[in-house]
Image (spheres, rainbow, N blue to C red):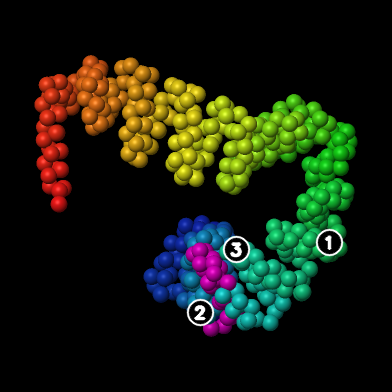
Amino acid sequence: MYNQTIKTTRDEDMSNKTIAEALIKAQQFEDEDKFEQAYECYKYALNINPNDTDVLQKAATAAQMLQNNVDAVNYWNQYMQLKPEDPLSYNQLLDLYFHDNKYEYYMTRAKLKTLEGRLPQATDDYKKAISNTSEDKEIIASRYLLAQTYEIINKPLQAIDEYLKILDHDKNEAVYLSLANLYYAEDKSAALDILQQAVKDYPDSEAIKESLCKIYLALGDYEKAETYAVSIFNRIKAMLMQEKNEAAFDLLESLSNKDKQDISYPALMAEYYYNVDDNDNALIWIDSLEKRNPDSPLPSQMRALVFEKTNNDFNAHFNWGKYYIKKGQYDLALDEYLNAYNENPQNTEIIKELINLYSVLDDKFACAEFCEKLVAIEKEDIATIKRLIKFYEEQGYEDKVMEYLFALAEINTKDYATFLQLAKHAEKNRRIDEAIEYYQKYLKFAPNSDEKEEIKKKVDLLATGEMGQDEGFLDKILGFFSKK
């Protein structure tokens, strides 16, 4: 009788209404404490648009209030799928699952902790979910999420263990691939074993074949790599590594214009020309590769190999240095850059690279050493001269400060800021004639200011010797108080 009453209410009141009208009607029913009729309005609205998250939330809340937990769970799960980053559905589901479904309770809690970034705690809940079910499907789902979480928090051994447990019950393609990826970094032979099992279970899987190709390329078995290659680029790569140069070049030439836009194309063209000893064209294609992917270390590595082949030691070391810089291996980069510098100490490009690298390594003295080498060649490098002045000021090396201030003053004969700085250092070092000279140069070119007026007074005192006498008297007093 109840269902018939609700159906009649819905048919009479909801016929041809919009979602907005249904929600207004639902609110009216709720205001009258007619919660069953309000719930029917929400369900009517969901029939119109099942993906309306606002209506899903209202329907789920109404179902909970009516203790229709099955519907509430379904609605909150739909809401979670549509808004996975909103914790609302997770919290509501935790209340719904707490007494009746411990497996789903812990799975939901693990997902919530993942959402909140508390991944180590999420692993504990996935384990509890596994212990609260005997269903293979549920255990496998939990283990898979647990393994993925272990991967994210960089616990590869634990992830491998969970993936292997899954394979004991389910020969899953995604699990095979995940395991191979985990093994690849540390033990390529183990990765190969896993993929050889995988290809037996999934002989038509292109993803598994491509992974096998990748491993065989890494292990140097290029014939087998070619056998498993699905990607045309991997096939060409395997052929080039076997010196099947002309066949590989024919494939490169046959590529579509779209394929030629792929990042692999210029790399393979460079490799082809390297193989056939056309080093000029190899370098042209390496330049093309670098333009497409300037952050990749590969172009520098390829250039280094070309220059090694042509006995160009300076450029070989220089490009190996760039290669290691892009890989963040600064100590190795430093060795290569120093080797390049020793090959050509007058090359300012390598000196500048060494200055930058020593700056990254925070070796200020080595950085200053190479700054000096640079300005010895590029005598009007104002930025580097100022860098040296700053460094030697910090170290208290007054002779060096003065040396580079004089050099800076000679480059720009109207730089009043440098004149002032030089005059102050000259005065500090009791070089009064030079102090007066550069204070006067400052006065000649500096704009009017309060500081300029003070400098004029100082110059007059220095010229008459009064300031020097005052300072001498002060020194005597300080000397007196320092006596025991």
Whether 453 is among the magenta residues is: no
**Residue at point 44%, 24% (across, down):** 381
Tell me the distance, in whole angstroms, between the alpha carbons under discs 2 and 3: 43 Å
Residue beneath disc 2: 67
Whole-percent x, y for residue 153 in the image: 58, 64
**Residue at point 18%, 27% (across, down):** 451
Quick one: 189 or 356, which is closer to the camera?
Answer: 356
**Residue at point 22%, 21% (across, down):** 433
Earlier in the chain: of badge 3 and badge 1, it is: 3
Residue beneath disc 3: 154
Disc 3 residue type?
Answer: Asn
Q: Main secondary structure of the magenta part?
A: helix
* Residue 5 in sight here: no
Quick one: 156 or 204, which is closer to the camera?
Answer: 156
Residue beneath disc 1: 196
Q: Quadrant of residue 300?
A: top right
Quick one: 372 or 260, which is closer to the camera?
Answer: 372
Disc 2 residue type?
Answer: Gln
